[in-house]
Image: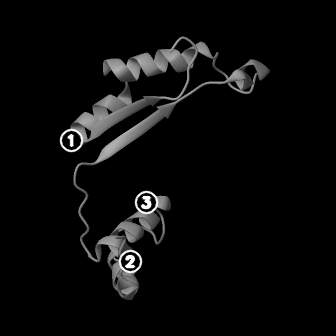
Amino acid sequence: MIKAIHEHMRASILNEINEKTKPLNSLGQIEELSLQIALIQGSLKPKISNPTLIVMAADHGIARSGVSPYPQSVTGAMVANFAGGGAAVNVFTKLLGWKLELINCGTVGG
């Protein structure tokens, strides 16, 4: 069963977020996500267990229209780099202790 969020804690959670040393709302969507997680968990100090970053990669024919500064082949090369552990995202997820899940949603040659 999905439980309702702890709406009664909204003001306290927002106060906790806004009292941090930073300009108000300067973290944009990170603040919104933090609020949402705290409301779901009903905690001023929410915890995330088993964090996973999901990278979904795909390419399509629109690249032939010249909308990207890179050729379509770059997508496959990046996917191979992610899979081989050689991309910046691999370094960050390893440093943070996160799992990296790579999903190839359809790349040429992939």
Q: How many marks?
A: 3
Depth check, mark 2 against mark 3: the one in front is: 2
Q: Give me the disc on residue 68.
A: none
Q: Outermost residue, bottom direction?
A: 8
Image location of residue 94, percent across then percent down = 24, 34
Residue 31 position (above or below residue 57): below
To which quarter of the image does residue 38 belong?
bottom left
User: Which amino acid does the dot numbered 3 rest on?
Assistant: Ile
Say which residue label 2 marks. Answer: 5
Q: Earlier in the sequence, mark 2 or mark 1?
A: 2
Residue 14 position (above or below residue 36): below
Task: Answer whether labels 2 and 1 touch (C-beta < 8 Å).
Answer: no
| Viewer-closest of 73 and 29 | 73
- Left or right placement of residue 102 versus residue 70 in this view: left
Q: Give me the disc on residue 30.
A: 3
Residue 56 position (above or below residue 63): below
Say which residue label 1 marks. Answer: 97
Q: Earlier in the sequence, mark 1 or mark 3?
A: 3
The 10 Å Cα crowd at callout 2, few under 14, some 14 to 19, many 20 or more, is some
User: Which amino acid does the dot numbered 1 rest on?
Assistant: Gly
User: Which amino acid does the dot numbered 2 rest on?
Assistant: Ile
The N terminus sits in image quarter = bottom left
To which quarter of the image does residue 83 belong?
top left
Image location of residue 104, percent across then percent down = 48, 26
| Viewer-closest of 106 and 81 | 106
